[in-house]
Image (cartoon, grey):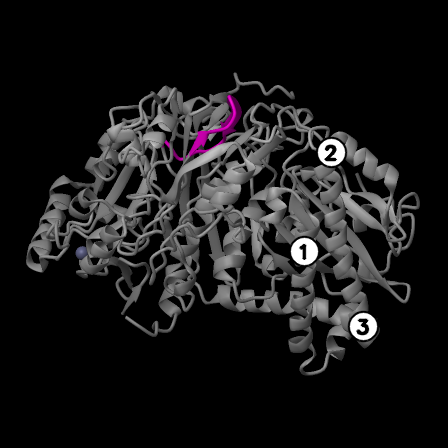
Amino acid sequence: MTSSAALEIPEYLRVRPIEVSPATVIGWTRPEPIGELDRSCLEALRPGDYEIYDEKLANYLDEAREIFIRSGVSGMLRSGDLIVAVYTANGDLASASAGTYLHCVTAMLPIKFVLHAYLGEPTVLVREGDIFYANEARYGGIHNPDQMAFMPVFHDGELIAWTAALAHQPETGAVEPGGMPLSARTRDDEGMKLTPIKIGENYRIRRDLLDMVVNFIGRAPRMQAIDTRARVTGADRLRRRVQQIAAERGNGFVRGLLRELVVRAEQAARRRVAQWNDGVYRTAVFCDTIGRETGLLRASLAAIKKGDTITFDFTGTSPENDSSYNCFPHVVAAHAATFLYAYAFHDLPVSNGLLAVFDWVIPQGTIFNASPNAAISNAPLVNCLTLAAIPKVMAQMLYDSPSRELIGACNGNTTGPVVFSGRNQYGIPVAEVDAAPMNTEGQGARSDLDGVDAYGFPWAHAGRAPDVEETETEYQVLRLYFRLRGDNAGFGMRRGGAGSETALAVRHVDAMPWNQRSRNAKITCALGLFGGYPSSSCFGIHVRGTNLWEKMARGDPDVPANTVELATRRAIAGEYRFEHPSRPRRIGMNGDLIVHLSGGGGGYGDALLRDPGDVVRDLKCGAISDWTARNVYRVELDPATHEVDAVATERLRAQARRERLRRGRPWKEFIAEWSKLRPSDEALGHFGSWPEGTPDPGKVRSWL
Amino acid sequence: MKRRITENLDIDTGSLTWHCHRCGGALGPASANYKQGCLIDARDPREVWRPLIEEEYNFSYDPEWMRLVEYYCPGCGTLIELDVLPPGHPIPHDIELDLAQLAKKPAAEEE
Ligand SMILES: [Zn+2]
């Protein structure tokens, strides 16, 4: 695929020439070189222009986001898992209102593709009033549930900017409902994948093309029709506002303003990076789930920092596999962006100027640079590894710098939600994600603060948990409990925020189909920092044939209020199944209990250095158990009054340090024993050779 | 002169050696992995998260899949760092600084 370049493209609309492929579009994450026109527009900005109009633009972006949310209907869109953004005429991200920073990377690339391939293509062209639409990861998206509308902004006949609106759609017409099929083996199992196409002209959506899109989404056509219009509505409102600025101040002003946002972010990012110590920072992180199976996957990351640039080198990452747990390189950059935009560079304009400082080395044939035909619909799940690796290396890089307060341990990083369907109590067919635990994971601890309990959804910071009463009113479930998890937040000098736990009981109906797609049960990637522990295991419980309704009708006082009580006291009769949280579709019968755990944030620093007063506070609020206070934090206290015995605590902690010195082995002695170990065969099914991770030539992928 | 490199580690930019931030004890040359100067224990995760039930999934992690590899200061027993690794996995050399650049840097404002 190359540009036909049939028409002469002016300099200010050119993008870097790229041989377009899923492995190469990451090259468009960098800002385009500044052309003569943009340079003269930058120079024409007057003092105060940037400050005033940056703010004005931010208001317009928030307005467009609000209109987008109110126009849409699906859950992820309504909860804010989206972006509305404005771009320079040649496709650089200038500013955004983001509920997730993932799409700072991914919503930009299809725009650059259109500029590259269609601007000069006489059969397509880019004209005033055009509306483009895309959801294909090969052209810059994450996975096909993420659909975007984008529009060129013309004023006085000149193309001066682009706008876009993107949100996750829960249905894609794939081989399974829900848009992220666990059984997908190739791209052909994953449903609708639209290359960037023109879905509208003259500011109107074309009915024939909308019908085509809706026709792909047979399980939820109405939802698709409404949300497609919502995306266009969001992009179009912003288009009008940019035209309004052009009418007030001129086209050159808009060009200058948008370019300035990119330039300022790049300059500030380079200044900040230059303050950090040059060197190589490495980590290896693991997850325990590949599609429907358990198995080890590894991300190896070396961050090479030199001067004002950083190279993220993922050599050593696991080979691509025959499931949908794969992705393309720009998707790794998108997941890195969730940390970079939210933490290390949170105060910069949300533009791709920041991305100028990063280079990416992501070897082909790995889970992060899969073959073009690989299934990739669970790309966000396999990138739990990126969400773990980036904060770890960045903490090592930033600690000895003025940016120390910007580091943070990994957020919960666990939840794949329970998804349920069937008919609700009113007989209406429903399909819903239980977004409660997923939007209440714990935040990682900071150098100076504990993590926030139930802070949100690590992939999309704006996500909000649904109201319990509303869920029970609308769906065929009772929420037995929904609360913070005890002993879940990563232990440490600063503790992580606690994740949540919930138990759903199937109610009002005889049966309810459900499934779950999660991880971090056998090994975790919700890591701590500098001696802080990761958060605790996330597994699943299914209790069949319960007597829950009888107990509630009798008003029994021993109905469990949390998962530990449920699992250890077994006051509810029934058949208990403790299982991996990646659970294929099954039927829950009336009264069955489905327990879903979300993850806490990683801890920070040696737990023996936590202030005993803070440990008591944790104990009082249920964040930790007596056992943890005594055995992990080594605090001696009165069980009744929670009064700390400071002298005994210091004695316990000194004893713990002596125990470490007795148990610990010098390097050579340790390595001699350690290197003889290997994980169970079950764990290594998709790992490749141990420990190198070289692909097993005997495993043939089904798309070959 | 010492620079604080992480929560628990310093580097002496004169002698180019790692040191424990808590007790100042030396942990070997700064060009090498500081973990080589630590005492190391690969812990069963069930020592930190106690199994509450006798099931395959029991509120802890699976020691066949995961160990907590802890690095202690041999002087004071501070937990300097920990890695979450499958049993036998090579130990990451996590911080390898450009020591020539580090030595040229002005002193940090604190510590
Ligand atoms: Zn020490």
* Marks 2 and 3, the one that precedes in the sequence: 2
A518 inside magenta stretch: yes
What secondary structure is marked by label 2? helix
Q: Which mark is residue A252?
A: 3
Q: Tell me if mark 2 has few (under 14), some (14-19) or many (20+) residues whose alpha carbon lies within 10 angstroms of its own.
A: some
Looking at the rendered structure, the kind of residue marked 2 is Pro
Q: Which marked residue is nearer to the observer: mark 2 or mark 3? A: 2
Mark-to-mark CA distance, 2 and 1: 24 Å
Residue stretch rendered in magenta on the structure: A504-522
Whole-percent x, y for residue A623 in the image:
29, 49
Chain to which the residue tagged by mark 2 belongs: A
Image quarter hosting the N terminus of chain A = top right
Whether the residue carrying mark 1 lies under 8 Å from ligand 1 is answered with no
Whole-percent x, y for residue B78 in the image:
19, 53
Q: Is residue B60 visible?
A: no
Looking at the rendered structure, the kind of residue marked 1 is Val
Q: Residue at x 38, y 28 (%)?
A: A549
A282 inside magenta stretch: no
Q: Which mark is residue A221?
A: 2
